[in-house]
Image (cartoon, rainbow, N blue to C red):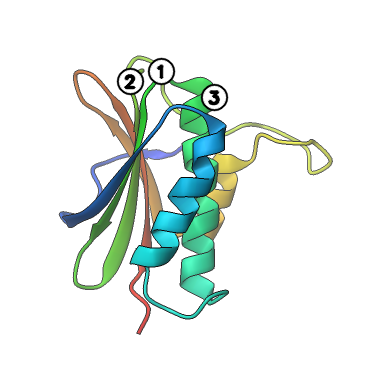
Amino acid sequence: MSNLSTSLPPEADEIRTWVLHTPEELRTLRAGLSEEIPGEPLADVPERMLLVATELATNAIRHGRPPTEVRLLRTETQFVLDVLDRDPDTPPEPADVSWDSAGGRGLQIAQSLSLNVGWYTTDQAKHVWASFPVPR
């Protein structure tokens, strides 16, 4: 697996932000994203976005410093999930796991289900983002 690119996400307007402290709050994130993303339930793009948001937020909660924020952004042609934690000194590391392992594939899943995945830091946070096409 290649390393994640260090890059800013596309310039986009913020639609909504969720602040998470525990894995139990992922349910609220998924419900909120379902309200914001157009498309039929179980449609391709919304389902991929829900899965990637859950994986990236779980990584941030488990491996970063709280609180975790998940921002939903939109351009004319793309949605962007921007997930941040308060640990800018620790880069995201795609796990080198076998397929029979119980976990560790969050970044791999994000890379396989999105248009693009990248990361960047600010003075106080690390951001991992993924982009998706806007459903027609």
The residue drawn where x is 23% and y is 19% is: 124
| Circle 2: element type | loop
Tell me residue 105's x, y (percent).
Answer: 64, 40
Single out the residue that lies furthest toward the top. 89
The reply, left or right, for residue 92 in relation to residue 85 is right
Q: Earlier in the sequence, mark 2 or mark 1?
A: 1
Give whichever of 131, 31 is nearer the camera: 31
Label 1 SS: loop
Q: Amino acid at mark 3?
A: Arg
Residue drawn at (44%, 64%) of the image: 34
Quarter of the view holding residue 78? bottom left
Judge from the rendering whether residue 19 lies leftward or rightward of residue 100; answer left or right: left
| Residue position marked by numbered label 3 in the rendering | 62
* Image position of 116 with respect to 25: above or below: below
Q: Which residue is mark 1?
A: 65
Q: CA distance from mark 3 to mark 1?
A: 8 Å
Q: Choose top left, top right, bottom left or bottom right for residue 65.
A: top left
Q: Amino acid at mark 2?
A: Arg
Residue where numbered disc 2 is placed: 86
Q: Residue at position x 33%, y 20% from top?
A: 86
Residue 22, image x and y in percent? 51, 28
CB-based contact (under 8 Å), mark 2 and mark 1: yes
Q: CA distance from mark 2 to mark 1?
A: 5 Å
Whether residue 1 can be seen here: no
Which mark is first along the chain, 2 or 3?
3
